[in-house]
Amino acid sequence: METVEMNSVSLKRPRSEDDVANADEIKRQKISGKSKTENDSGQSIETVAEQRDKSLLEDMKKETISNEESEEQEDEELEGSDEDGDPESFADMMKHGLTESDVGITKFVSSHKGFSGILKERYSDFVVHEIGKDGRVSHLDDFSVPVDDEDPSEETFTVLSDEDKQRLEELQLLKNKETSVAIEVIEDTKEKRTVIHQAVKSLFPGLETKTEDRDGKKYIIAYHAAGKKALANPRKHSWPKSRGSYCHFVLYKENKDTMDAINVLSKFLRVKPNIFSYMGTKDKRAITVQEIAVLRITAQRLAHLNKCLMNFKLGNFSYKNHPLKLGELQGNHFTVVLRNITGTDDQIEQAMHSLREIGFINYYGMQRFGTTAVPTYQIGRAILQNNWNEVMDLILKPRPGAEKGYLVKCREEWAKTKDPAAALKKLPVKRCVEGQLLRGLLKYGMRNIISAFGIIPRNNRLMYIHSYQSYVWNNMVSKRIEEYGLRAVPGDLTLKGATAVHIEEEDVDNYTIHDVVMPLPGFDVIYPKHKIGEAYKEMLVADNLDINNMRHKIRDYSLSGAYRKIIIRPQNVNWEVVAYDDPRIPLFTTDLDKLEGKPLPVLPTDGKFRALKMEFSLPPSTYATMAIREVLKMDTSIKNQTQLNTTWLR
């Protein structure tokens, strides 16, 4: 993914080992609201309320690999380990998670002194605008609907009762044995019948209608024209030839990820999610603006959803002849607020100038590796080793730390019985990775783990091995920067078009660090000719893998490899320090605020707190957290930030 999913955390400078040693005594102290504490140098810093830790836990639980797919199931409370039934503190649960150094993130490129700040104290402090392949930044600034004489009237959306809609949906989705649904026409007129015909056909694609007389009353009869093949597939002859087949629109969403949003839209439109297309997935805990395309759904129907959806707005409608393709965007533009910063004006200026002029190390961010005690890269490594018992064990075994209660029970049952059916009974939600693997084991047996694992959706399976590639890349880039610094050296790699070539001694002065790329391991890449090339081989040998044989007996798991720039210099970097008193007020206006005519927030000239408002644009597959990490000089892992927020209290 090209954007960052990061929860509200207070990003503070680490304290001394003596402070950490006091953790057991301190961790049970109650936090009520924000309080002040001092570090060893006497610097005053903010701590974060216990309530935010609970919110962080709820959001974090939804980010684990077990919950990649959309789930309607309510999050269950985590069960604590205390015999008295008191839940573990959030810091206790996260102490088993990963830190940046665990995944190879160890270096910085700038020389300024770091400072503290709170990222995503409110999800509205993190705004993402998609940049299309033409370089245009997506904005929601127009709710109008393209005029089309063939669009149904507004009455189409209100003429059917809720009961009629329920029966029609069940007919459309073949959920009952009925072959038709009869709707009585009250206040019978030809115009009324026409509106009902239009309503059924436009709101329930795949259904046809006819009028019948029954006992002296007029009924509209809805039925399937072509059985299952017609399901959610609008009839071709019903769509004007002059109109593009795809309705493109801008989706503005708050605190919801892209797939969840599309699932909600599909449910309200009564269509399958696969008729939607998009260029990239966007964060959950943020306000994001991106382009979506949908096959043969009118702008009028989409605009009608603005009346009934929470945390969504749709606009900027247009008809085109093509869908959108994943990855065909130029990147994303970020607007980020870091609240309650402690840095001096000079520190902030140095940090932001460095970000604009030099950039940051293009590490894969922490969300690439999961948030539980079993990192995704370990499962990926086991897949590449063809060690399927290890794959099964890593996914299903009990693990310490933060997880949903029913997952804990499922893992305990698995450890005790090794019975897929018994473990599956502990899961109310079967679409998580654990549930899918258990269903596969139930179907194919314990001796055919490969087929059982294959039940997990392909993207989720590939995520594991991509995580391992990212783990290797991060470690190698840290070694490269430690060994050779921020300059191009002979033996480095650079791209000529799409082809990687080595930088030769006589040409080295023609290149800078911004030209250097490094490979993700695979069978179709070359490696640096200096020490780091050997370091790749050594790392893979230590993991029982052969760098010269990255083809897997199962084609899906064969890694071709790729190249990635080691330093990214953000574009359109701007920043401003503002003062504020109330942590609840927004510090800038969003697209929706502007459409609704909301005024700019009035900020004091000398408030109690200071915030850094920063804007920058990044290419796809780069992580905004890594840019923020470079500015603040801190560890972005949930484990580290949680310990800082909940443990170091006075």
Image (cartoon, rainbow, N blue to C red):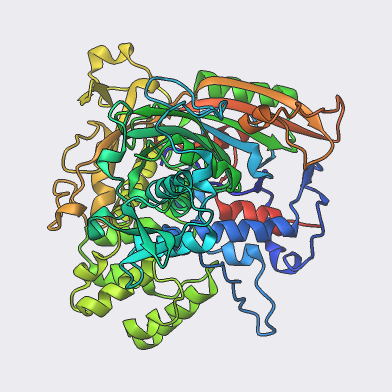
Where in the figure is residue 537, as x and y percent of width and height?
Answer: 23, 46
Where in the figure is residue 575, as x and y percent of width and height?
Answer: 65, 23
Q: Seen from this angle, which residue lies furthest bottom?
A: 417
Residue at screen point 45% across, 21% down: 136
Where in the figure is residue 272, as x and y percent of width and height?
Answer: 36, 52
Against 458, is 302 above or below?
A: above
Where in the figure is residue 85, as x and y percent of width and height?
Answer: 67, 82
From the image, which quarter does the C terminus lie in? bottom right
Image mark count = 0
Q: Is residue 196 left or right of residue 58?
A: left
Residue at screen point 50% across, 25% down: 617
From the image, which quarter does the N terminus lie in? top left
Answer with the quarter of the image where residue 170 lies.
Answer: bottom left
Answer with the quarter of the image where residue 112 lies.
Answer: top right
Q: Which one is in front, 61 or 496? A: 61
Residue at screen point 25% across, 26% down: 491
The answer to whether one can see residue 543 in this image is yes
Q: Seen from this angle, which residue lies furthest front?
A: 216
Against 190, is 526 above or below?
A: above
Answer with the quarter of the image where residue 286 lies.
Answer: top right
Q: Which one is in front, 214 or 161? A: 214
Q: Which one is in front, 264 or 602? A: 264
The answer to whether one can see residue 111 in this image is no
Q: Is residue 175 left or right of residue 75?
A: left
Against 264, is 503 above or below?
A: above
